């Protein structure tokens, strides 16, 4: 059983091989399998430019952060990117503590993240 | 607002007592990941009803999550292993003590490595190290004790934040 | 690149007769298929229907080997068992996902978690949660949500979980209200949950003067009367618990009062 997380997927207008993923809920050890499968499937299908909208992501722990770094690495290896937008203050703090702010591509909002897509 | 709530509470429950510090709430649950989300949210809500700020509660939720995940991953040997989380709540701080069954030799070695800080102040960045690093950053004190029988207990102290910090505008 | 020879070690689990843990190591390639098949035949002959395949030491898995695991799983499922994986690292999980295997096989972080899942789902073994807390009314809402969330996490539906939340709320409120005035004794909440039912036990040191009124509320005639009094704010708790649960009992001894409720899963 997994803790509550929902992922919704949307196309990004005018961008090739790109998707917007909205994370809703808590990202933790109980649901990384689910998230891993969904996002890796996208990357494997060739959708290598991903923007993750964290506006409704309430919570993330070290395990969750581990897979975010994995997505970033995998997308880059395939010539794409994994950008994060709209992080709330609490989640940002955890990313900062781990020292992952430089490893992840973080943007203030969706417009900024979309504009940075090549 | 809070006063009105208290008054209403008194009318319906004339015998109810107000929270007085310190008090302790103990939770014992199976060494299974399934239980952690519910336990960590319980602690967060417990702190909020004890008049700690929501930010304090959130940070404490992360501490509980990380120490519980460690206990499940590294401190349980048998399938019926139980984990005990003691939440001692004072008016100025919370102390968590988590006790598990004690892991295998290999797990204990990894735990010791994750806790240890080398001479240059660098920590080994294992997955477990990452979790304990978050705990260390969010708390005033973190002690890991492994007794002669390899039973592990982790003790964390987190102090109530200054009100001014809560009001500090975010960038 | 040289291939690492595949090794298999079969382990039985005391107390879980139907389970076999298979520790694989090395490279699982097309040449390994025959040995994998033989290994599962040996497991089947021992009457084991639930196989936990430990992949911690596996460095490579080919599509041919994965196909063999699928065949073995099919045979185990026909005997009401399963084949599950444990101990895969992130890289290996990603590879299995790419091969479409994560849609077929259940994957657990470690052997213990896989074994727990077997005991829960197949043996329907109960799990226990215990909370001790001081008699403060404000602690009850977080507490009732703790139990409700656990029920939801363990697969209970929204309706069942909501009813469980109401039951915990009512019993704990009663325990807080009927506790001995001035007593510092903690209230004990025990929950035993399995896939079919949940049992809740709340124990506290009761005020002897209130025990009589508490037990009286259990009488059907009193419960009905209370229900009809619009000006009475409290006292409907036990009536409500009775309506929501399958069994309710109250036991008063020198050690305190224990209210026990059993609720069978409906959804």
Image: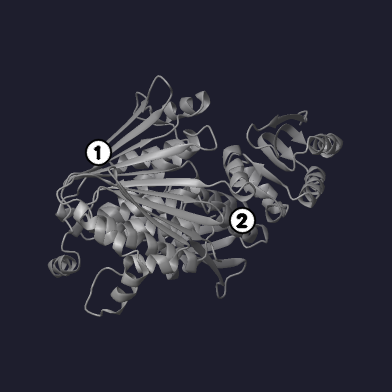
Q: Is residue B167 left or right of residue A1?
A: left
Quickly name the residue at label 1: B140
| Residue C87 coordinates in the image, percent (x, y) | 62, 39
Q: Residue at x 47, y 25 (%)?
A: B109
> Residue C86: horizontal and vertical position, in percent?
64, 41
Q: Residues within 10 Å of mark 2 (few under 14, many from 20)?
A: some
Is residue A108 shown above or below C51?
A: below
Q: The N terminus of chain C is located in which quarter?
A: top right
Q: Which element is circle 2 on? A: helix
Inspect this view and state whether residue C203 appears: yes
- Mark sitting on residue A37: 2
Q: Residues within 10 Å of mark 1 (few under 14, many from 20)?
A: few
Q: Looking at the rendering, which quadrant does residue C130 occupy?
A: top left
Q: Chain of mark 1?
A: B
Q: Is residue C76 left or right of residue A71?
A: right
Q: Is residue A108 left or right of residue A3?
A: left
The subunit carrying tag 2 is A
Residue closest to the eye, C27 or C85: C85
Q: Position of residue B164 (x, y in %)?
A: 15, 55
Asked if both marks, 2 and 1, belong to the same chain, the answer given is no
């Amino acid at each position: 059983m997994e803790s509550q997380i929902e992922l919704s997927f949307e196309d990004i207008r005018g961008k090739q091989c790109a998707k917007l993923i909205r994370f809703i809920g808590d990202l933790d050890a109980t649901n990384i399998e689910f998230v891993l499968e969904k996002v890796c499937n996208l990357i494997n299908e060739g959708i290598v430019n991903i923007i993750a909208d964290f506006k409704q992501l309430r919570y993330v722990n070290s395990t969750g952060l581990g897979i975010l770094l994995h997505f970033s690495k995998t997308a880059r290896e395939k010539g794409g990117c994994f950008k994060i937008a709209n992080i709330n203050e609490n989640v940002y703090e955890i990313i900062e503590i781990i020292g992952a702010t430089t490893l992840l591509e973080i943007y203030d909002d969706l417009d900024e993240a979309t504009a940075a897509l090549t | 607002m809070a006063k009105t709530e208290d008054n209403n509470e008194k009318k319906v429950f004339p015998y109810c007592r107000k929270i007085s510090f310190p008090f302790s709430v103990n939770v014992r649950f199976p060494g299974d990941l399934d239980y952690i989300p519910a336990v960590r949210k319980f602690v967060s809500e417990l702190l909020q009803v004890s008049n700690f700020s929501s930010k304090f509660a959130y940070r404490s939720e992360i501490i509980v999550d990380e120490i519980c995940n460690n206990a499940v991953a590294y401190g349980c040997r048998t399938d019926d292993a139980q984990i005990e989380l003691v939440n001692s709540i004072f008016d100025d701080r919370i102390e968590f003590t988590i006790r598990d069954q004690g892991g295998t030799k290999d797990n204990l070695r990894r735990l010791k490595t994750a806790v240890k800080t080398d001479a240059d102040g660098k920590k080994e960045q294992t997955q477990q190290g990452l979790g304990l690093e978050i705990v260390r950053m969010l708390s005033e004190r973190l002690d890991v004790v492994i007794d002669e029988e390899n039973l592990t207990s982790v003790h964390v102290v987190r102090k109530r934040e200054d009100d001014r910090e809560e009001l500090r505008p975010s960038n | 690149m040289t291939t690492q020879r595949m090794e298999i070690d079969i382990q039985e689990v005391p107390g879980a007769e139907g389970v076999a843990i298979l520790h694989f190591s090395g490279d699982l390639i097309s040449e390994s298929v025959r040995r994998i098949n033989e290994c599962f035949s040996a497991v089947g002959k021992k009457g084991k229907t639930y196989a936990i395949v430990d992949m911690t030491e596996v460095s490579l898995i080919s599509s041919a080997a994965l196909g063999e695991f699928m065949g073995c799983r099919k045979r185990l499922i026909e005997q009401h068992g399963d084949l599950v994986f444990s101990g895969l690292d992130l890289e290996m999980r990603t590879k299995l996902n790419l091969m479409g295997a994560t849609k077929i096989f259940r994957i657990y972080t470690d052997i213990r978690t896989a074994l727990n899942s077997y005991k829960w789902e197949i043996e329907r073994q109960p799990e226990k949660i215990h909370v001790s807390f001081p008699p403060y009314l404000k602690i009850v809402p977080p507490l009732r949500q703790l139990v409700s969330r656990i029920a939801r996490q363990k697969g209970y539906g929204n309706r069942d979980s909501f009813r469980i939340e109401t039951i915990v709320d009512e019993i704990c409120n009663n325990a807080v209200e009927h506790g001995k005035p001035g007593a510092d004794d903690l209230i004990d909440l025990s929950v035993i949950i399995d896939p079919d039912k949940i049992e809740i036990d709340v124990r506290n040191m009761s005020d002897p003067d209130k025990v009589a009124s508490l037990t009286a509320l259990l009488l059907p005639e009193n419960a009905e009367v209370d229900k009809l009094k619009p000006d009475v704010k409290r006292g409907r708790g036990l009536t409500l618990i009775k309506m929501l649960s399958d069994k309710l009992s109250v036991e008063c001894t020198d050690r305190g009062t224990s209210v026990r409720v059993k609720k069978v899963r409906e959804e």
